[in-house]
Amino acid sequence: MRGDTVGGENLLQNDDIYRVPETIHFPTEEKNTLEIWKNEKTFQRCMQLSKDRPRYTFYDGPPFATGLPHYGHILAGTIKDIVTRYAYQQGYHVERRFGWDCHGLPVEFEIDKLLNIRGPEDVQKMGIAAYNAECRKIVMRYANEWEEVVTRMGRWIDFRNDYKTLYPWYMESIWWVFKQLYDKGLVYEGVKVMPYSTACTTALSNFESGLNYKEVVDPCVVVALEANNIENTYFLIWTTTPWTLPSNYACCVNPSLEYVKVLDKKSNRFYILGESRLSSTYKNEDEYEIVEKFLGNTLANESYKPLFPYFMEKGAAANAFRILVDDYVTADTGTGIVHNAPYFGEDDYRICLNAGIIQKSSTPICPLDEVGRFTAEVTDFVGLYVKDADKLIIAKLKERGVLFSTGQVKHSYPFCWRSDTPLIYRAVPSWYVRVEHMSQNLRECSAQTYWVPEGVRDGRFGNWLKEARDWAVSRNRYWGTPIPIWRSPSGDEMVCVGSIEQLAKLSGKNIEDLHRETVDDIEIPSAIPGRPPLRRISAVFDCWFESGSMPFAQQHFPFENRSSFMNNFPADFIAEGIDQTRGWFYTLLVISTALFNKAPFKNLIANGLVLAADGQKMSKRKKNYPDPMDILHKYGADALRLYLINSPVVRAENLRFKEEGVRDIIKDVLLPWYNSYRFLLQNIARYEKEDLRGLSRYRYDKERHLRELENATLLDIWIVSVKESLIDYFEKEMKLYHLYTVVPRLTKFIDQLTNWYIRLNRRRLRGELGDVDCLQSLDTLYSVLYALVHLLAPFTPFLSEYIYQRLLPFQPKTSNSAATSSVHHQLMPQVDTKFIRLDIEKSMSLMQTVIELGRVMRDRRTVPLKTPLTEIIVIHRDPASLAAIERLSDFILSELNVRKLTLSSEKSKYGVTLRADPDHKTLGQRLKGNFKAIMSALKSLSDEDIQTHLSKGYFDIQNQRIELSEVRLSYCVAQNQGNNLEAHSENDILVLLDMTPKAELLEEGLAREIINRIQKLKKKAKLVPTDEVVVFYRLSDNAQEELQGVFLKHENMIKAAIKSEILVYSQEAISKLHFIITELANIKGLDVEFTICAAKATRRNTPQAHGVNITLAGELSPRFGQSRKANVLLKSVVDGKFITLTQLQHEVDVNFGLYDCKYNIFWFDGMQQQVRALSASDLNENLNGKVLVVARKACDVQRELFQSE
């Protein structure tokens, strides 16, 4: 339907422009739109159109392309796309570059698995150059899949002008960043106890260790350490890491806690432990006898015998194996005495360092290799992986008689975020960036930023900044940006290089690549004559340092784009998952604060996690979630985008992903929106044909519309007011990045438009109240839909584009056709506050409440809307509200199909009283024994009593506070008012509906049923309102008496509704017309046959319809709860041509929702007496009335399926 010009003249010459399909397959149309965007370079064009506008800067956090995108990526990408599209439509130029994280553990771990590399020695054997070459091969393994998913989701981002962390120019900027930190004195080398991944053979930073905690069951042991100076006395220590016991150097108690010495009656030994831990250590009190009590500080420096001999001599020389004191020991775990292995725990290291047992320069007591296996120093367990050694260590302790008890403990434990293996804590040499001294600066810079949700910045993120630790930025790995430090063999001479040019000047070597295989062999001559050259240290940067440097590195700052970068830094917007509070958000802030003392971004959205439907983490192994591409194939990107954004996940809460939620978006939002556009075009077609008599075309004229709006109906004024209020709200909330408040308001507006404005305005839109009224309502509906596609464009880019392109031909011609070629090139509509009428919006809200209450009451009594009722009574205390309801009384009477509306402010006049009943489930569980007395008191409350309690906001019954949510309120109508008054209320509005049946009203209800069946038959025949047809009816014997009078009495009403002549069945009359369709209908148990024929006056020949019945067989099931059977016309009622096989398959897809399913269509060939697959040549007159069976394979098709022929 898109035109080559804005006016769309070529399209308007086609008589069938307004024949909008009744059904739409959103995924198919989205693919068509993608093709148009690709061919017309729509995204690239928008960048050209906005190049002279002010800049809106956006940073895209780089994902790894070694894994496929999941719902978390899709969610974050959708948020980014919405915000950047909106920024463009606010008049900004928005550069959107995709980035790739290419280095580090995620890549190396994949190669280690692929090549069965178990440690550094394997890498050394194959060589770093060969190893890195393998890494380079898989870096972009899934890049095509990423681009496919991101593009299919409708996200506009530049993949061609991307940045990759492996680009030499990107790596050079990282060198510059590091040198700035080095020159500021923020870089140092040290040995610290760090989280360590044995699978990846590298230390992790503290924030990385917090990315993947799991609940695990570990062994726990209580071990007895024999005191040297107290006879037959032992210190009881507790640990969940038995593998650290061979490296024990000290124990620690809390100086202020109470400790006890007890006699163990079974072993006859004396044990010392925390008094508060007795009940956890012993099962029964009769197993021990307390001998002495004392504070922990009395144990200071008491010595004990080492558990193992491996480091006995070193320990003795360092005055180890003694009791230390520190406040970090708590009274709620273990035995109150903590074992210290200084090189396997942060607190252990700190305490032993403070006690002088170890020095910063000491050789670490750390008997493990890179992959976590014991070295030769631990002779009994050499070569064993630490976790595997636990059982043997426990057995050895038992053998030596020092194992007091053993068991298991369930606790939260950190796992490697990449390899998903348990981390250990161990001392490792590393290069650090000083962060601890910056804690206050970090918080001040963070305070300059705006977060959604707001509480995350000062809560989760702020707490992390308060405890900021020095950042270990080095990794003893291979595939990454090399740390640019060259050092002499003696370590007393060191150079930090900040650029390729500087390295060339220092070394005389010109290079283009900066990876290890290139720079490791480069030497820098010593500045001291006669000294050996400086060589680069072996470490590389961890990938978080690389991604945290992306604001600078993606621009190759400061080597290029210096002014551009400085003018647009910090970024206006970033977004990622809530887990990045300890990841990318943190590293960005640390580097930017260290370099410029400012935050690197102004606004941030942190989204929650997308979980499986059962609340568990999505798992490929468990297959507990639908594949994203399957969801896109079934429902389309718009539905998925809207489902994700209209959920708690945008408020940093978790979302349980449910496929039916995506499906409901189609049913509740997209289809009503599409149908409102379809209804508009149908009525534009009617207006042109009947009111303009085909002499001219409808075009929207804004000046005409706004001029006539001053004298428009209340409905037009209302919907324009609601639209302007929406635009105002939209702008304010989007400035606050509140996507989660905007989407519900947009979807509510679609409901207001479709279920209220269009529904209540049908007669005007159809021209039944005159052409002037019709034009005004068409202008109003057009303007509202035109504004709506602009507002929804960032959220649902595909359907917005689809409808916009089909509204565009009705716009006045403009010279700037390029700027109007896509809705995504448009600026957002601006609010015009003079059209906001809050008084009318309130009146309509009251009317809607009355109608909705009336519908609920009809449902209670199972009285359909087609059955007219006598009276509705609306009770409200406020006279102004009653007056507002009275102004809209025609709509209330029409929508509820009621004859009379009565307004009152006195409910007592109608004998209506409130009744209170307890909510048995909630109140019964809470009150238990008191429930019966409270229930009796509640039920005995008078209407006046209930009103008093309601004014307080709670019920006060027998000194018990009862919340309103724990009480069920209902209205009772006095018996003297009759049994046919139904009551219902909401807030201050009470509505009564008289359900008394009356004969004349029941007749009218039958007439409405007749209208409904005829309209459905027209729809089935794919007729549109402008098609001129005649409807014939034939009554069965059982229907003659009851229905003949209805047809005659309500003939005018039926004609007006169906916009066609209705005549008694006449074979002679039908034979002179063009037959279209016939069907037998059952109305309230009465049979009526309807036949529709083309009227003689029709402009086109409408040929007789040929049809086939289609049924599904085998494992094929219809989607969206549709029937397994359908009827399809073989001939077009437009041109009389037979349907093609492709068109027939499309009809099957539409009727049963079988998009992207493989199937065949079978029929029973009577001539050959066999079932066979349908071919194109079979689509002719002989197929009329046949049954076709849709199935995957022939064996699913039985001859019995064709018996309905």
Image (spheres, rainbow, N blue to C red):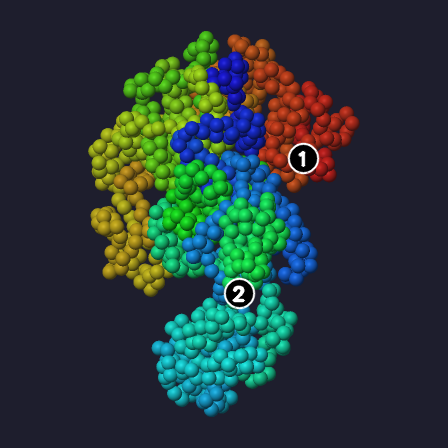
The answer to whether residue 393 is seen in the rendering is yes
Q: Nearer the viewer, residue 460 or 947?
A: 460
| Residue at the spot 40% in from the left edge and 32% down from the top edge | 54
Dot 2 or dot 1, earlier in sequence? 2
Q: Nearer the viewer, residue 1013 or 703?
A: 703
**Residue designated by label 1:** 1159
The label on residue 428 is 2
Q: Nearer the viewer, mark 2 or mark 1?
A: 2
Which image quarter is the C terminus in?
top right
Q: Amino acid at mark 2?
A: Val
**Secondary structure under the numbered disc 1 in the rendered image:** loop
Tell me the quarter of the picture where residue 891 sits. top left
Evaluate if marks 2 and 1 touch, with contact meaning CB atoms under 8 Å apart: no
Q: Is residue 417 above or below residue 2?
A: below
Q: Nearer the viewer, residue 598 or 1000?
A: 598
Q: CA distance from mark 2 to mark 1?
A: 61 Å
Q: Is residue 156 above or below residue 1096?
A: below
**Residue 416 at x, y = what percent?**
54, 59
| Residue at the spot 28% in from the left edge and 26% down from the top edge | 834
